[in-house]
Image (spheres, rainbow, N blue to C red):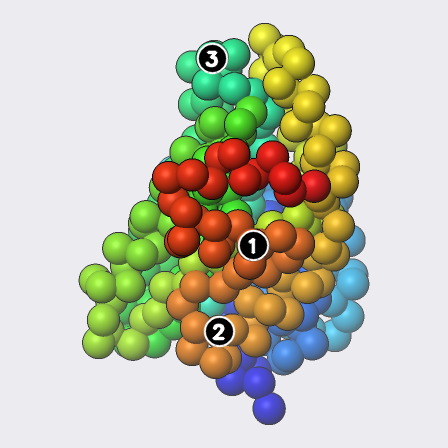
């Protein structure tokens, strides 16, 4: 029996991709689900796919601080607890640091970094009062290595990693666990639905072509790997195509990996 059976699981970005995969796998394991997304149509489809699981859905823009804090109160009202929070909602923005505008970078950081900060802050008090829970923050393999034409995305995902690793120490002995996830090469619609800098040029075109080759692993792999990792007590989870390769590159050749990245793909 899964340790997640009967637990209240909060998943952002649940309307598609990895978020939907989390919802379906959690439903299979018997969790009660509080699912959110900025797109209500996809969210409703996820609810339908969850079958007989206990599900409530919420429209949420994770970049809105006040909306996220209110969301935590809504979940507490509707379920009485929150045992697992998966800060999954995210966006992508292709652009070099040179080409990106400050407004473009701010938009991406509002979603990918501040959204995770808000989710952590919104639900942490409940978990600490329960003395039990998991905060799962979705970073990326681009939170392990810096990659060209992914400047703002790198900043956001390294930030998520820093936040989560800080929590490892701060939450010691509280019963609350922080988990950092580094997916790589996951086949979702994030690349197609993401943005490209208005100043994009050849560097951005090169990354887009490479992305088509790299995005191969299905999102269901991430959901299973993460939930299995949680049940085994892991606090860093590496999953998806090239994820292990990039992790070890960042560990063993931290100053020289950029030239080796050209060999991947």
Q: CA distance from mark 2 to mark 1?
A: 22 Å
Q: Which residue sits at x=38%, y=72%?
A: 133
For label 2, the SS is helix
Residue where numbered disc 1 is placed? 245
Residue 76 picture location, percent across and down: 42, 63
* First reached walking from the N terminus: tag 2 or tag 3: 3
Q: Which residue sits at x=34%, y=55%?
A: 164
Residue where numbered disc 3 is placed? 98
In this rendered view, identify the residue nearer to me: 178 or 26.
178
For label 3, the SS is loop
Residue where numbered disc 2 is placed? 230
Residue 100 picture location, percent across and down: 50, 15
Look at the numbered discs 2 and 3 and tell me whether their residues touch, using CB distance below 8 Å. Answer: no
Image disc number at residue 105: none
Residue 207 vertical position relative to residue 221 in the rendered view, above or below: above
Quick one: label 1, few (<14), some, or many (20+) residues within 10 Å?
Answer: some
Q: Which residue sits at x=72%, y=45%?
A: 215
Residue 209 vertical position relative to residue 51 in the rendered view, above or below: above
């Amino acid at each position: 029996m899964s340790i997640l059976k009967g637990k209240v699981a909060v998943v952002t970005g649940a309307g598609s991709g990895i978020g939907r995969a989390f919802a379906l796998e959690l439903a299979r394991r018997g969790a009660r689900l509080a699912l959110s997304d900025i797109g209500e149509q996809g969210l409703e489809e996820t609810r339908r796919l969850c079958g007989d699981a206990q599900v409530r859905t919420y429209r949420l823009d994770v970049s809105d601080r006040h909306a996220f804090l209110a969301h935590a109160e809504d979940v507490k009202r509707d379920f009485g607890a929150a045992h697992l929070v998966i800060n999954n909602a995210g966006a992508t923005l292709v652009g070099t640091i040179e080409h990106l505008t400050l407004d473009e970078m701010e938009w991406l950081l509002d979603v990918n970094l501040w959204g995770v900060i808000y989710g952590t802050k919104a639900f942490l008090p409940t978990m600490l009062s329960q003395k039990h829970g998991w905060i799962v923050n979705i970073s990326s393999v681009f939170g392990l290595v810096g990659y060209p034409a992914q400047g703002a995305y790198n900043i956001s995902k390294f930030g998520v990693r820093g936040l989560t690793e800080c929590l490892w120490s701060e939450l010691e002995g509280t019963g609350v666990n922080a988990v950092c996830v580094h997916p790589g090469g996951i086949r979702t619609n994030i690349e197609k639905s993401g943005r490209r800098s208005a100043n994009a040029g050849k560097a951005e075109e090169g990354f887009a072509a490479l992305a088509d080759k790299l995005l191969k692993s299905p999102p269901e792999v991430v959901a299973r790997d993460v939930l299995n990792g949680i049940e085994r007590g892991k606090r860093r989870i590496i999953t998806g195509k090239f994820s292990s390769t990039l992790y070890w590159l960042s560990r063993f050749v931290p100053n020289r990996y950029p030239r080796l990245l050209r060999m991947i793909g």
